[in-house]
Image (cartoon, grey):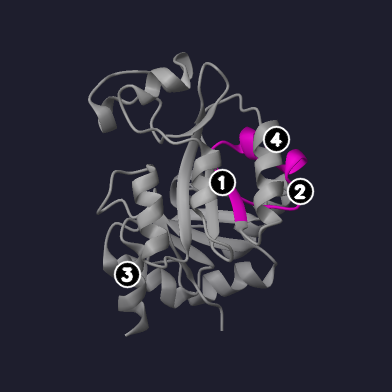
């Protein structure tokens, strides 16, 4: 039976500020299965963990990440480097790194990934941008690469597993990270996994939806309180 990984979404972000070392550390202290986080490039080419293009939502100041240096960002918010986040991750734990913004320089990230893979850490990449993930195909052929997608919005209906598999194979993606949906049942997930695809769920905004995704057998799901949800799923 497939074991679903419960990944702490932007860290254990219900109890610590999202995409900070505090949230990532809390995830590891609670023995989460892993961490999901977002990365962007600063104006001085530093790779930092930030979800939005600007710090407006998390810090109250409309400072665009791509237009400021790492030091300038740190003056208004505790923005960690991806290298720091990877140091927090424990061996045997999984990290799903979402690539935000275009274009993206993946050369430094490749070196970091190699270092931490060698330490027994599990690493995957994701993006909403097809072009970004296709670039990752070339730089990270040995690493899981899943497209973040709202299946119904993209296909203009809820697709069949065959349609999703054909799409992934066309782009050479390892699988999908789809917006959690009760129609994605065990039959749907099993069919994708039988074709060698990785299946992840995001947008787990209720425990009911998260438990349904786990019951369907997804490889992983992301949740702001992943450890607590995992405990519910075990009962």
Quarter of the C terminus within the rendering: bottom left
**C-alpha span from label 3 to label 4:** 34 Å
Q: Secondary structure at mark 1?
A: strand
- Determine the CA span between mark 1 and mark 2: 13 Å
Can you identify the residue that label 2 sits on? 141
Image point (29%, 57%), residue name: 205
Query: What residue span does the magenta drawing correspond to?
Result: 123-146
Q: Earlier in the sequence, mark 3 or mark 1?
A: 1
> Decide: marks 2, 3 in contact (CB < 8 A)?
no
Observer-nearest residue: 159 or 47?
47
Q: Secondary structure at mark 4?
A: helix
Q: Quadrant of residue 27?
A: bottom left
Is label 3 in a helix, a strand or a loop? Answer: helix
On residue 180, the disc is none
Q: CA distance from mark 2 to mark 3?
A: 32 Å
Up the image or down, 11 lies above or below 50; here it is below
Question: Would you say residue 137 sits in the magenta stretch?
Answer: yes
Relative to residue 190, is residue 166 depicted above or below?
A: above
Chain-order first, disc 2 or disc 3:
2
For disc 1, the neighbor class at 10 Å (few under 14, some 14 to 19, many from 20) is many
Q: As drawn, is 88 to the left or to the right of 17? A: right
- Residue 135 disc label: 4
Residue underneath mark 3: 229
What's the residue at 69%, 68% (across, down)? 195
State the image coordinates of residue 232 (x, y, percent, origin top left): 30, 77
Q: Is residue 224 visible?
A: yes
Residue appearing at x 64%, y 37% in the figure = 109
């Amino acid at each position: 039976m497939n074991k679903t990984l419960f990944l702490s979404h932007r860290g254990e972000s219900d109890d610590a500020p999202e995409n900070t070392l505090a949230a990532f550390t809390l995830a590891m202290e609670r023995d989460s299965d892993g961490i999901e986080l977002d990365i962007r490039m600063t104006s001085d080419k530093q790779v930092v963990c930030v979800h939005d293009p600007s710090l407006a939502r998390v810090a109250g100041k409309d400072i665009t990440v791509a237009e400021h240096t790492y030091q300038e960002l740190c003056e208004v918010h505790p923005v960690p480097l991806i290298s720091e986040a990877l140091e927090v991750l424990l061996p045997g734990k999984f990290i799903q790194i979402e690539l935000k913004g275009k274009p993206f320089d993946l050369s430094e990230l490749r070196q970091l990934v190699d270092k931490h893979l060698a330490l027994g850490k599990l690493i995957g990449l994701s993006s909403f941008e097809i072009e970004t993930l296709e670039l990752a195909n070339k730089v990270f052929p040995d690493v899981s690469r899943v497209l973040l997608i709202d299946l119904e919005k993209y296909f203009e209906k809820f697709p069949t597993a065959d349609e999703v598999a054909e799409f992934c194979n066309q782009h050479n993606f390892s699988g999908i990270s789809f917006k959690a949906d009760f129609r994605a049942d065990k039959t749907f997930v099993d069919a994708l996994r039988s074709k060698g695809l990785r299946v992840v769920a995001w947008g787990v905004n209720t425990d009911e939806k998260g438990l349904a995704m786990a019951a369907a057998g997804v490889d992983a799901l992301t949740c702001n309180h992943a450890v607590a949800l995992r405990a519910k799923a075990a009962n």
